[in-house]
Each structure stands twice: as C-alpha cells, then as structure tokens.
Image (spheres, coloured by chain):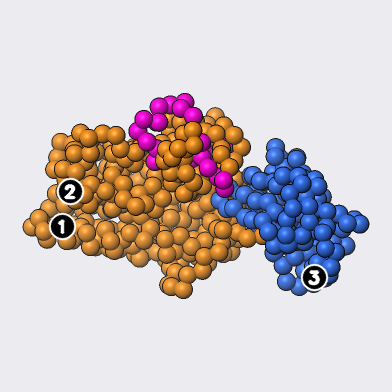
Chain colours: A blue, B orange
Amino acid sequence: MAKVRDGLKYTESHEWLKLKDNIAIVGITDHAQEELTDVVFVELPEIGKEVKKGDELCVVESVKSVSEIYAPVSGKIVKVNKKLDDSPEIINESPYDDGWLVELEIKDKSEINKLLDAESYKKL
Amino acid sequence: MYNYHNHIHLARMVLKSPLYKIHEKLGAKFTEFAGFEMPIQFTSIKDEHLTVRKSVGLFDVSHMSNVWITGKDAGKLVSLTTVEDASKIGDKLSQYTALLKENGTVIDDTIFMHLGKKFMMIPNAGMSSIVTTWLNDKANEYKLNAQAEDVSNDFVILAIQGPKSRDTLQKLTKTDLQTVKFFGCRYIDIGGVRCIISHTGYTGELGFELQVTPPKDAEDLFLKILDAGKKFGIKPIGLGARDTLRLEKGFILAGNEFEGGRTPLESGLSWTINWDHDFIGKKELLKQKKQGGYERLTCLKCIDKGVPRHGCEVQKEGERAGIVTSGTLSPCLNTGIAMGYVRADYREVDNELDIIVRDKSVKTKVVKPPFVPKDWAK
C-alpha cells in the first residue's frame, strides 16, 4: 500500500505540498512514484520562474515513460532540489523527504483551500 | 502528474495472452502493445533488465505471430518474399530476414525456421494477417504451390534469455542443449511439453525461444521454467525491459524503426540481404544503393544528461540532421541512448549531434552498435 503522510496537502494528480508560511515544498506522492517506478531523469525548472496553478512544473521520467508534474498552486520558484540531477532515484526512495522537487513562493493563498488533506487523498 | 505512457485507452478489441492470469498472479502491470494487453513490468524495468543481463529472465512473447508456410514451393515462396535465399538455410536452422514491398520498403522483419518440409515464420505483433495475406497473394501471383496459414492463436511463445538460460532449460529436458547451436531450431520435449526450440532472442544474451502449442500446455511450462531457474534468481520479464534490452544492442523494433516506410538499406539491415537471388523489392534496393546518400539508422549515445524519445529531432548546429525512432535511458550504462535516421554525411563514429528533447538540446555522439558489449555482466 502506498503511504500517505498526514499533515501534507495533496492534489488529485498525485502531487504533495508541505506548507510553511508563504512557501510550499512540492513533491510527488508515494503512489505516484510507485506508478512510475525507477525515476531516471528529472527536468527541473529555473529558479525565479513564475508558474500558474496547473502549469507544467517539472518533468519526471522513468525508463519507459515521461510524466509532467503540475504546479499545485500559483507562485514563483525559489528553490529546486539539485540532488535530483545526479540521483533521481531518491524520488523512489524518499518521495516525501529527500525526493522533494521544488519550493514555491505562494502567490494566492486562497488556492490552498482547494487542495486535499491526507484523509481526502487517501480516499481517491 | 500526467503520464504519457498510460493515457491511451482505445475503444477496440484488445487481445490477451493465454498466460494473462499467471501474469496477473505474478503481479504484472499491463500495457497495450500492437493490439495485445501484455505485461510491461513485474518488479521494475531496471531490475528486470539487469536480471536478464546478469542471470536469466522468462518472457511471454505470445503477441508475436506464427505463420506456417507449406507446400512443394514453400522455400521458393520464402525466397521470393524475403531478402534471404531460403535454399541456403538448411533444415533445423532459422534465419532473421525482412519482407519487402515492390518499392523496397520493409513490410516486417521476421525470423523463419526451416523445419523439415515446412517453414514457420514469426512476424511481429499485429502483423499476422498482413503477412499471411501477402504471402498467399504472392504465391498466387507467381504461381507457386505454397500456402501460408496464420496459426498465431494456436501458439504461445516463450523466450528464456540471459547467461543462465541454458542451465535453466537443461534441467527440464534430456536433449543436450549444447547441440542446439546459435540460430538452430528443432522439436524438443521440455518440461513434458513437445515444442519447437530455437537458439534465438532479442536481448543480445545467450537465449532460447519456445513455440508451444496448444497454448494450454504453456501455463504449466511457464511455471516449470520459473521453478527450474529459481537457483539463478530467474524472474518473469515484461515488455518494458524487452525494449531496453534490445535497444542497448541496437536491435530494430519494427513499429518504431520502419515507421513511414524504410528500406533495409536505410534501416541497417544490409547484412541480411542475399543479393544472389531474386526477391520482391530487389530492383528498388539496387537503385537506392547506386544512388546513395540516403538517411541511415544510426546509434547515438548521450554525452549530456537527458533521455531521448521516439520522434525527437536530431540536429547538427541547429539544422535538422535526422529523427529519433527509439530512445531510452540505458539501465546498464545509465546514460541516454537512441537510434534514429541520420543524414548520410553525419554518420561517422564520434560525430557529435544534438537531440532536441522538449526544446532542450542534448549533446550526443555517433557510436557503433551495440551500445552495451557482449557479456557486459562478466
């Protein structure tokens, strides 16, 4: 069974967010990494790039497949997980911790209300 | 997350392998390929890939086709419709070849086995009726006493591949498998089942393929092979690893590399052509050979990070130089690798070319196949 971590926010498209003031750390869920298996390449966005909710945030590739990861909220990219350049497999090993993707500076806090909590995500 | 690989759900009949239920029990994830719902992976592509390179894996490749060619002129029909002269392929031998249209482009690449007075051809998945119809039409047109019969539904095809494949199968048969030479084929009793064995494969490793009929017999045999290979860590292998294994060796996948119509000269199959006999498409090939200058299938190894994919453009200094037909991350090399059609003047080994992956340029260089050498795991 894929793990869902309490205290995080989720999207129906299997991204998670960890909120800290106006910053959101974004990654993909355990279920998503299980579906992908063997992440071999991550294309990260440039720092400073502004994204709207639903825009392509980054691309995660497994051996056979290419998956777009969407911005769960609008905002500016302030940090990216550089470790993924050399060790993309940490997304599989630690999807909720070391395998985070980007940090976003949230533009519109009201968008957070539309995200799922752990309980609702589990029910998907 | 939007996954490009799994988004196609076509509203038409999808065929299942007779071993579908066994795959399900073994934890397979499935994909649709050429009209068949087949396992794409059981554990993970990387894990399965390395299992085959280092030890042994078992594939169900029942999506491939089986066509019997019989009649007095069976051999003549094979010679006419493929680039091989079948009279040069003795009894109990198999041959990799290609069927061409009159215009020289490939209909399908295939292996045929010479079994006594009959030939069994193994066209690709989804090609059985096209190839069978073609063969019968040509037999009529050229007044040959030969018939082709599509028996794909009567056969399960198993592939046992990897350095421990022979040791695994030897446990299930009294026949000394050392006597089945590379590209040899024959009838054999294996695990109590009568089937056709050939020393062939699509992984570049030591390997065998079994044609099993009726399909019911294959269920038991599949499990027996898994049991026989337990000591070596045998695993069932899905189509995902089958694709990465073949690509590391520079082997062609028909649906990718012949897309849009390609001749064997373009697709790197010149070595399969026996020019000393007449075959459909020969005239056009001779013309193309004389003219020269055509794009040819080329192997490109990434220098930069990135994973080239089917359809990516190949460039030289910003100008189009070709197109990628197959690309992946090589599980053995941990770098991106690709095959594609590249302009004749850009094909020399070590020439640097760019592959455009999602608007970004990934630097590559031309290499000679295979990407991964023989006995890589040793």
- Give the Cα distance between marks 3 and 2: 64 Å
Q: Secondary structure at mark 2?
A: loop
The 10 Å Cα crowd at callout 1, few under 14, some 14 to 19, many 20 or more, is: some
Q: Position of residue B97 (x, y in %)?
A: 28, 44
Q: Residue at x 50, y 53 (%)?
A: B239
Quadrant of the frame with the N terminus of chain B? bottom right
User: Which span is picked out in magenta?
Assistant: B334-359
**Callout 3 and callout 2 share a chain:** no
Residue A110 x %, y %: 84, 68
Q: Which mark is residue B280?
A: 2
Q: Closer to the observer: label 3 or label 1?
A: 3
Q: Residue at x 39, y 31 (%)?
A: B347
Measured Cα–Cα span from mark 1 to mark 2: 9 Å
* Left or right placement of residue B24 versus residue B324 in this view: right
Which residue is label 3 attached to? A114
How packed mark 2 is, by other alpha carbons closer than 10 Å (few <14, some 14-19, many 20 or more), is some
- Give the position of the C terminus of chain B as an image quadrant: top right
Residue B138 shows which numbered tag? 1
Say what amino acid the circle numbered 2 marks: Ile
Q: Chain of mark 1?
A: B
Element on which disc 1 rests: helix
CA gap between label 3 and label 1 equals 64 Å
Q: Nearer the viewer, residue A92 or B43?
A: A92
- Position in image of residue B242 (x %, y %): 49, 48
Q: Kindly identify the residue that appears in the image at 53 percent across and 42 percent down.
A: B356
**Labelled pair 1, 2 in contact (Cβ < 8 Å):** yes
| Element under disc 3 | helix
